[in-house]
Amino acid sequence: MDTIASLFSFITTPVSWVIVQFHSVYGAIFGPDTGWAWGLSIVSLVILIRICLIPLFVKQIKSTRAMQTLQPEMKKIQERYKNDKQRQSEEMMKLYKETGTNPLSSCLPILAQSPFFFALYHVLNGIATGKTIGVINQSLLESAQKAHIFGAPLAAKFTDSADKVGQLGATLTDVRVVTAIMIVLMSSSQFYTQRQLMTKNVDTTVKTPFMQQQKMLMYVFPVMFAVFGINFPVGVLVYWLTTNVWTMGQQMYVIRNNPTPGSKAQAAYLERLQKHVTHHEKTRSRGEKAIVKAIVAKGRDRNEFERKFINSLTKVGLVAQADGTVVKGQAEATVEAEDGTTTTTGGAPKRQQPKRQSKSQRQSGTAAGGAKAAGEAEPKTSLTKSDEPQDAKPAAEPAGGGNKPGTGTRSKAQSGQRKGPQRPKSPSKK
């Protein structure tokens, strides 16, 4: 560990200087030799570092989502070139270059924190061994050795002997109880952070090896923290617990307000957004407009939750626009179903076709028409077709047979037959 600490000795002086500056502020409030002054100085150091790392955290989120999207393509490349590792690596690098992704971007926050972590460890180890380091002089060293957090010295470890802990003015029981609680909290916060990422912020429609890898890390990381935690000083445990809690809160904020498309978190977010937009009948913030704009731009490529969001707006008379705004009173809107089919709602009513009459209705209408026309002579033309169906019986003929002109009746040929005398049908032969 001394070799690793020496590699990061270039940052030891800045880290110790920041701690001393915070200690001067908190020492004036709580007292220079108290655990609150030194403990809060370490917590403030963590917060300052994490604020500076927010751009890297945003880049990590984008890279992680891009890697999740590329998993199906990566799997195809692995299957296609499974016997040629060199070609497989070349195709992977080509895919990363075309999509602008970098697998190492997801590790940037951890890598960026590593120098500060080892520098703080080196500072606290110097306090435990009674060595001045960085800007911490002899008076500050003695003040830090007197500082206790719930009875445990800043420089004490879980594995320290009773004699060494006694030299720092504490008991072995206090040190082990405090360090054990911190290790459990540190591991639990790490597990919860990884779990909420897997259960809430992962696209459930895509099953890839990346998800299995993340699920494995969800259990591996807490165990690693527990194993290495027994060798960390109390001050380092304070640092690591604070950064884990910060990461957990930061990730909860991102999952709630900028979830991964297709995840359960997106379903919950769009449900809240739909209620908010319906209530105000518009998108109010820039973030809401960006989300709506992205959903509209997808068109038929929307997932189940996004289609449900668009349909919910349409049902209450709202339509999402391409610029992310929402307008009311559109004459016509398109509703997209879950299976991808679209239907048009609103606008002018559709033209309805007349209902088809039954055979009895048509016959009664024909009889009424014939009675109404009685006594009126109609010109008889050979091109006139009867509206009467084939199976309708002809009207009774007057005595004397045949149709007489001027009687108001016409000879009506059956549909599909010629007028005039018909050839009798030949009897069927049995």
Image (cartoon, rainbow, N blue to C red):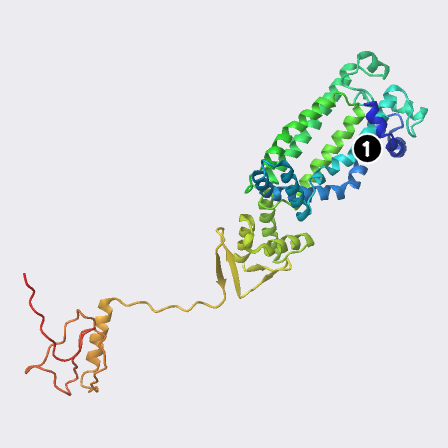
Residue 323 percent across, percent down from the top left:
64, 60
Farthest residue in the right direction?
138
Residue 35 visible: no
Q: Is residue 407 above or below residue 132?
A: below
Q: Is residue 47 visible?
A: yes
> Which residue is at a point 53% across and 66% down the rendered structure image?
331
Q: Within 10 Å of the Cα at label 1, are there few (<14), some (14-19), or many (20+) other Cα atoms? A: many
In the picture, measured across the screen, residue 186 lies left or right of residue 315, that is right
Front residue of this view, candidates 109 and 86: 86
Q: Residue at x 81, y 32 (%)?
A: 115
Q: Is residue 117 left or right of residue 349?
A: right
Give the labeled residue for mark 1. 116
From the top left corner, tell me how far across and down residue 54 is, in percent.
Answer: 76, 42
Residue 407, given in percent of the width and then of the height, sits at 14, 85
Q: Residue at x 71, y 22 (%)?
A: 227
Q: In this rendered view, identify the residue nearer to me: 181 or 219.
A: 219
Could you say whether the residue bearing mark 1 is in a helix, strand or loop?
helix
Name the quadrant of the C terminus. Answer: bottom left
Instruction: Please say if 81 is above or below 191.
Output: below
